[in-house]
Amino acid sequence: MKPQQKLLNSVDRCVDEALEGIVSSSGCLSLLRGHRVVVRADLEALKGRVALLSGGGSGHEPAHAGYIGSGMLSAAVAGGVFASPPPASVLAAILSLRDAGVSGVLLIVKNYTGDRLNFGLAAEQARNRGVAVEMVIVADDCAFDQPSKAGRRGLCGTVFVHKLAGALAEEGCPLDEIVSKVTEAVKGIGTLGVSLSPCSVPGCLPSFDLPAGEMELGLGIHGEPGIKRSKVTSADEVVKTMVDHMTNPASQSHLSLKSGDSVVLCVNNLGALSCLEISVVTRSAIRYLEGRGVRVARVMSGAFMTSLEMAGVSLSMMRADQEILRLFDARTTASAWPNLSTVCISGKSYILDPPAKDMQETSHTEGPLSDVMRKALEAVCSSLLQRQEELNSLDRASGDGDCGNTHAQAAKAIQEWLPSHIVPGCPGQLLSTLAGLVQERMGGSSGALYSLFLTAAAALLKDRSDPAAWANAMHAGTDAMRWYGGADPGDRTMLDALCPAVEELGRLTTAPPGGHMAILQAAVEKAELGAESTRDLTARAGRASYIATVHVTLPDPGAVAIAAILRAVFEALGGQK
């Protein structure tokens, strides 16, 4: 097995280069020369106030440098990937803050032995130099029913502590008061993680093996395995398992949570879950907590303390009274802190009713053209359904192979609509109705294009239905497709069949009454020739434009569908096959 590929320049330099990237792109941060220490660029603003310093191993980005800013951390110390920072760097950070004139320094440390030792040693050395230093240990892990002597690990709940302490420091609170308040708040914080994959330190093999279809519950943020392995289930079930474990009173590391309590929830992406998955998990967590009678006051959802590329999520909860929420809501300039609303999540309705449907749809009446238009629609639907696999086959050469399916969906929608509805005598009303059906049921870019065509054409057929009006309507529909779709004839799209046909139909504006069918027949033939000509065209629009030219030698399926539709209409009107 080889180490997992990573987009780096150097394994040895990756932490330093990452810090340089963070600082150089910020404008509000600085690097301490010779150390992996990031500080606020405006240290002078801290004079007379308590400074906050945190840190730990790298690989947890955006922690910890992402939380530096007014109202949060003053500085952060980075170690190697998953390695505690050396005490010399921690001390250098403390002394830099001292030189800025701060009244004291609070160290916020996650409960790992290396961090406790190295931050602790630096704290003692700083005290010997006359610096007022205190240290708060965050141990929010709820995984172990009976934690070892080392205690509960420090996890993503540490970010809550950064925020509360930062808000207090910004208000000018003295060091001892911040320590007292934060220490009390830590008692109400709990975190639990679950992962669908391990992670790997740059240049190393994955930290543990996890077979496909299994998940690890209760893992830490340094790639260590968890306490329990089980089959992957739904997001709802995973969230239920996590929250139940976190709040199980039989566990010595549980978070006490009862109905009526108010919490801040953090749904933390451990690195490689998609944003879509995190949003689904967030929904599940809110719903499950509310189902247990817990009031969800605020929600953070995103990547806040990661574990490299681990495909997992952790849930952190903090019991919150009004004072906790006030501090949580306080302004910060830290780049990784989300821009959250101060509105309570629970109890807020987030569903709005859409506008009422246009009641004009119910006022349709039949007319002289109703029967012939019904017959034409039936013919079009039948033709598209017969050609479903042919269109799919053509589309597989240049797209995702579903062109026949999408046209069949539209055909079936129209077939379902016809038996229970009258066909309006006004062609404009019919085309508007068809536009709605196609938009709703066809989907994809084809559905949007057809709906655009029908909507634009309908506007010119509201009050007229003579051949000239039909010709002008077809022209308007085609113009809409070209304008919004961005394609033109020659781009190997449905327009290569539609445009020559519509151009021929333009002759209806001046044709004598007996020449209409001949023009329609000519339009059909031009559409078929246009569809066939797409064999020799280079795709410049649509999905086919991304396929190498040598691979696309069949006619465009959209153009073939247009020709089939026009042929079906022509034959339904009595034209010869």
Image: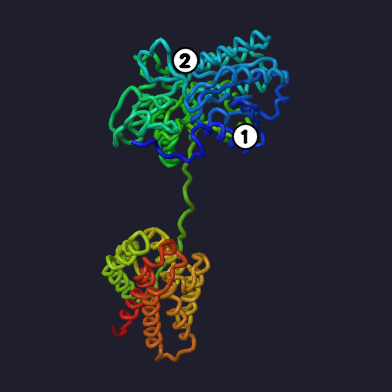
Where, by quadrant of the figure, is residue 493 drawn? Answer: bottom left
How far across and how far down the image is residue 201, in percent?
Answer: 43, 31
Residue 447 makes an appearance in the image: no
Disc 2 designates what residue? 113
As shown in the figure, which amino acid type bears the numbered disc 2?
Thr
The image's mark for residue 132 is: none
Task: State the residue at coordinates (46%, 74%).
Answer: 490
Disc 1 designates what residue? 23
Is 408 placed left or right of 66 in the picture? left
Residue 157 makes an appearance in the image: yes
How far across and how far down the image is residue 173, in percent?
Answer: 66, 16
Colour setup of the view: rainbow
Is 466 placed left or right of 532 in the picture? right
Task: State the residue at coordinates (42%, 40%).
Answer: 5
Q: Secondary structure at mark 2?
A: helix
Q: Along the line of sight, which residue is nearer the eye, 523 or 542?
A: 542
Task: State the residue at coordinates (40%, 74%).
Answer: 534
Task: State the residue at coordinates (55%, 33%).
Answer: 343
Q: Which image quadrant: the N terminus?
A: top left
- Total of numbered circles in the picture? 2
- Whole-number angstrom distance, CA of label 1 to CA of label 2: 28 Å
Q: Secondary structure at mark 1?
A: helix
Label 1 Cα crowd, 10 Å radius (few <14 / some 14-19 / many 20+) = many
How far across and how far down the image is residue 233, in percent?
Answer: 30, 34
As shown in the figure, which amino acid type bears the numbered disc 1?
Val
Q: Along the line of sight, which residue is nearer the eye, 299 or 554?
A: 554
Is 12 placed left or right of 534 in the picture? right
Label 2 Cα crowd, 10 Å radius (few <14 / some 14-19 / many 20+) = few
Q: Which image quadrant: the C terminus?
A: bottom left
Q: Along the line of sight, which residue is nearer the eye, 101 or 186?
A: 101
Tell me which numbered mark, 1 or 2, is placed earlier along the sequence. 1
Compared with 115, 17 (above or below) is below
